[in-house]
Image: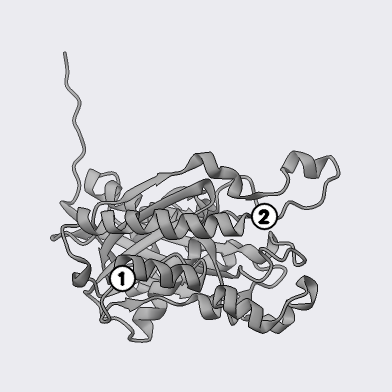
Amino acid sequence: MASLTASKGAEHARILSVAAHRPERVVMNDELVEAIDSSDTWIRERSGIISRRFAAPDETVIDLSAPAALQAIERAGLTPADIDTILVATITHELQTPSAASILAHRIDADRAVTMDLNTACAGFAYGISLASDMIRGGSARNVLVVGAETMSKIIDPTDRGTAFIFGDGAGAAVIGPSSTPAIGPTIWGSDAGQWEAIRSNSSWSDFRDGAAWPTLRMAGPKVFRWAIWEMSPVAQKAVDAAGIEIGDLAAFIPHQANMRIIDQMAKQLRLPEHVAIARDIAESGNTSAASIPMAMARMLDEGQVASGGLALLIGFGAGLSYAAQVVELP
């Protein structure tokens, strides 16, 4: 009987570059407070958010993704033709099909790339990092573009006190490629699917077709807050342990930018030393779901908050309830 030949890729993978793109429109808290009977102080105390960016009415996930993708590719010293796989993490692509990744591939002249969307909300980018690493090491890809992009402003109800002030829009992109040394640690991922209703659309497309209002996001805030703090901190610690390092070896902690209080509590639970830089992009970007980790990473590197080559702990968590965490070497 004939035997099959198995593909074999690079021994290791790494993040070669990262970039971000933010919409032009800045939305301060004062613009949102009247519709939710709130105040700037109330929003800052509960979320740490000062402002966020909203996409223009005709600006799509693809429009936000393309500039970030092209900059990340350039920073990696590659061209779009060198990208053989594109993974886009998003829950706000405006078409059911084709995928955002397919349209993005055409937009940036990477028409021959393998394309796939990931619908794991706020954990999407960390999922994409893991899949890209596995594909490169398995031999099915060499240079993978991983994008997290959202237009959350288009799926929130401006009168919903639980979500209207939290979310923002933007895109972040990273290029993952082969490495001669380990630079992406094992991923600790999974879900708590029994709590799927904690973050969900309030109606379906079928309901909308039958006359219901446009579906918008709803979130059981206190439940998600407790889950993130008490369940995700152990996941983050497992990712550190799986990478074979100590917490003190980290240069940065880049969690999903869900809420400043969640970030602070996770840092406390992990007992992060003072030298570990903590991403706080949420203050000026809001919660950008799948885009939040790459946007925060790009800001930290671009502003010199952390140096290239340092180790960063990433963790994404959100709707599903899904999560993923890994330690990476910063590009």
Relative placement, left or right, of 248 versus 225 is left
Where is residue 134? Give x, y as percent. 28, 47
- Name the residue nearer the viewer: 222 or 325: 222
Relative placement, left or right, of 169 versus 326 is right
Residue that appears at 17% across and 59% down: 182
Task: Kindly state the secondary structure of the residue where label 2 is placed.
Answer: strand
- Name the residue nearer the viewer: 211 or 248: 248
Q: Is residue 185 visible?
A: yes
Where is residue 116? Give x, y as percent. 47, 47
Residue that appears at 52% across and 79% down: 283
The residue identified by callout 2 is 218
Residue that appears at 29% across and 47% down: 135
Query: In the rendered view of the protein, which quadrant contains the C terminus?
Result: bottom left
- Name the residue nearer the viewer: 197 or 25: 197
Q: Residues within 10 Å of mark 2 (few under 14, many from 20)?
A: many
- Name the residue nearer the viewer: 272 or 51: 272
Of all residues, the one furthest to the top in this rendering is 1
Which of the two discs, 2 and 1, sits closer to the camera? 2
Q: Is residue 28 visible?
A: no
Residue that appears at 43% across and 53% down: 87
Mark 2 vs mark 1, CA separation in Å: 38 Å
Q: Which mark is residue 76?
A: 1
Where is residue 129? Give x, y as percent. 35, 56
Based on the displayed image, in which of its 4 quarters is residue 146 positioned? bottom left
* Amino acid type shown at disc 2: Arg
* Amino acid type shown at disc 1: Ala
Where is residue 68? Give x, y as percent. 47, 71
